[in-house]
Image: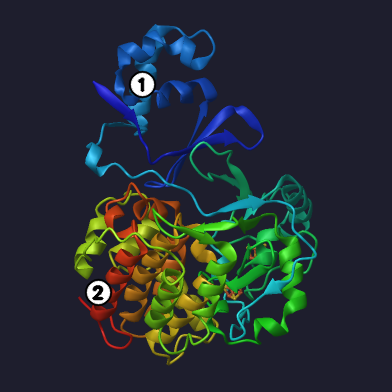
């Protein structure tokens, strides 16, 4: 029998014990704990080794003496737990992820200015969606200690507000706030019991702002995962600089883009020129989200000697299904986004919008799309993708879904869903050089043709393809 350790399982060492490996199955939400040697044996089933071969090599794989006779029952147990699969067809394997166009530093610069889009505004309406399941509030050791110290007086004796969560394949698991279904510190009045105190975790302090550094300045933007913050309802960000600086200072990590930017598979430009093109395109963002996106693409194309491999655009419905076919079944958000389904947390989002008195914003979907395009491009969140071409296409797919949402609050919910999808390494891999539409994302000219086709099918106003 040829077996394979399931590629979608997320495994990593326990945060404070390398001898224990934690394994998370997104499909069922189950956690498993294995001794590290058990994990090494289990994960050595790569689709080519037989049980006998693994048993013969068990001691070598485990780095300790293992009785080969014990491997059979151990494998049976892994099968019973659903951790091993029969090999999948090579054509349906998820593509490899080429990584973002930034590196992450832990030192937060105090002397670099913060840049914000002049029209972006922000106000927290205490909707509290961000304090419930689906939002990971990761914690470092100091934060775990602080929260455990304050928990008994707020939550009662013996209460532990901490859990452990996976971060990515092979990465050490992280401590996080146990917020399923809701953070224990969220009061009945939807206010945070530790807001303003030293115990408030850095993620909560910074949320929903995103910071990306160019080295010369730090771009701050509001993420559209936030139910109410991304609606431009509050004061302009430019009037909230002191608060932004304290959020930036509270950040534990800062993404810094490289000096040169990969435009597509063939071309690069200096990052200052790319950043100017991206932010410049958002100056007239109210005109249309599609116009903003196309303007950014043309501004970048104007600066390169381009190689156009001539890929023809796919029909809009075909491009969604070509990508969706290769989505990992467990990439729930990406699967929902590409299938143009509702957000998996739709009920909670609509409830939050009602509670924050935002359930009838009476606003056409294309305005939601326009803000999303503005913040994604000028906030430099596009650098999460391996090339600008892939990042442009990702935004095009998002705009198709948001602009064709029938009405608010569905467009709000779609923007939140897509903001999650745009954060996913899974979507990045699907749009990358090993993905199913690599011929289109290989050149920025091919992406522009694809965006034009999407725009024709999903115009700014009116419903697009079913
Ligand atoms: S969703 Fe955003 S704006 Fe709303 S309560 Fe949470 S942080 Fe505040
Ligand atoms: S600590 Fe406060 S802000 Fe953070 S998730 Fe809990 S209730 Fe929300």
- The quarter of the image holding the C terminus is bottom left
Q: Quadrant location of residue 85?
A: top left
Q: Which mark is residue 453?
A: 2
Q: Secondary structure at mark 2?
A: helix
Residue 256 horizontal/vertical position (percent): 63, 57
Residue 134 visible? no
Rendered residue at 59%/38% (across/down):
172
Q: Residues within 10 Å of mark 1 (few under 14, many from 20)?
A: many
Residue 357 or residue 322, whichever sits in front? 322
Q: Which mark is residue 75?
A: 1
Q: Secondary structure at mark 1?
A: helix
Please determine whether, in this image, residue 448 is positioned above or below residue 59: below
Residue 49 visible? yes
Rendered residue at 40%/86% (across/down):
288
Task: Find ligand 1 in the image and state its quadrant.
Answer: bottom right
Q: Quadrant location of residue 380?
A: bottom right
Please determine whether, in this image, residue 28 is positioned above or below residue 296: above
Q: Residues within 10 Å of mark 2 (few under 14, many from 20)?
A: some
The earlier-in-sequence mark between 2 and 1 is: 1
Rendered residue at 35%/56% (across/down):
431
Position of 127 with respect to 460 (left or right) is right
CA separation in Å, label 2 and label 1: 50 Å
Count of numbered circles in the view:
2
Please determine whether, in this image, residue 150 is positioned above or below residue 217: above
Residue 288 or residue 192, whichever sits in front? 288
Residue 94 horizontal/vertical position (percent): 33, 44
Rendered residue at 45%/70% (across/down):
300
In this view, which residue lies farthest toward the front? 305
Q: Which mark is residue 38?
A: none
């Amino acid at each position: 029998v040829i077996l394979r350790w399931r590629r979608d399982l997320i495994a990593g060492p326990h945060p404070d014990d390398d001898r224990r490996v934690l394994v998370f199955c997104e499909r069922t939400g189950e956690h498993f704990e294995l001794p590290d040697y058990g994990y090494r044996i289990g994960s050595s089933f790569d689709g080519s080794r037989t049980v006998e071969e693994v048993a013969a090599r068990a001691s070598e794989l485990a780095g300790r003496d293992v009785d080969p006779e014990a491997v059979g029952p151990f494998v049976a147990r892994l099968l019973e737990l659903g951790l091993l699969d029969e090999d999948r067809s090579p054509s349906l394997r998820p593509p490899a992820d080429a990584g973002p166009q930034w590196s992450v530093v832990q030192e937060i610069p105090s002397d670099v200015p913060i840049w914000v889009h002049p029209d972006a505004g922000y106000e927290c309406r205490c909707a509290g969606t961000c304090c419930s399941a689906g939002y990971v509030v990761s914690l470092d050791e100091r934060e775990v200690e602080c929260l455990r110290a304050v928990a008994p007086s707020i939550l009662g004796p013996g209460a532990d507000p901490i859990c452990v969560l996976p971060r990515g394949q092979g990465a050490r698991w992280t401590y996080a706030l146990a917020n399923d279904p809701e953070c224990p510190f969220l009061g009945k009045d939807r206010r945070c019991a530790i807001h303003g105190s030293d115990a408030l975790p850095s993620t909560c302090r910074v949320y929903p702002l995103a910071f990306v550094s160019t080295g010369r300045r730090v771009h701050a933007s509001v993420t559209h995962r936030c139910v109410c913050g991304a609606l431009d309802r509050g004061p302009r960000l430019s009037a909230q600089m002191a608060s932004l600086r304290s959020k930036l200072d509270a950040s534990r990590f800062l993404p810094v883009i490289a000096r040169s930017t990969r435009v597509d598979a063939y071309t690069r430009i200096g990052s200052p020129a790319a950043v100017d093109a991206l932010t410049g395109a958002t100056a007239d963002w109210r005109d249309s989200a599609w116009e903003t996106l196309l303007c950014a693409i043309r501004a970048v194309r104007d600066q390169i000697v381009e190689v156009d491999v001539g890929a023809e655009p796919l029909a809009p419905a075909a491009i969604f299904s070509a990508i969706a076919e290769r989505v990992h079944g467990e990439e729930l958000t990406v699967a929902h986004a590409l299938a143009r389904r509702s957000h998996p947390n739709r009920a909670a989002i609509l409830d939050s919008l009602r509670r924050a008195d935002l359930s009838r914003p009476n606003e056409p979907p294309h305005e939601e799309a326009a803000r999303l395009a503005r913040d994604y491009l000028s906030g430099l969140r596009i650098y999460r993708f391996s090339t600008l071409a892939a990042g442009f296409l990702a935004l095009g797919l998002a705009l198709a879904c948001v602009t064709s949402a029938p009405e608010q609050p569905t467009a709000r919910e779609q923007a939140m869903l897509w903001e999650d999808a745009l954060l996913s390494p899974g979507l990045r891999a699907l749009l990358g050089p090993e993905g199913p539409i690599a011929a289109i994302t290989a050149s920025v000219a091919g992406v522009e043709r694809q965006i034009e086709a999407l725009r024709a099918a999903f115009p700014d106003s009116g419903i697009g393809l079913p």
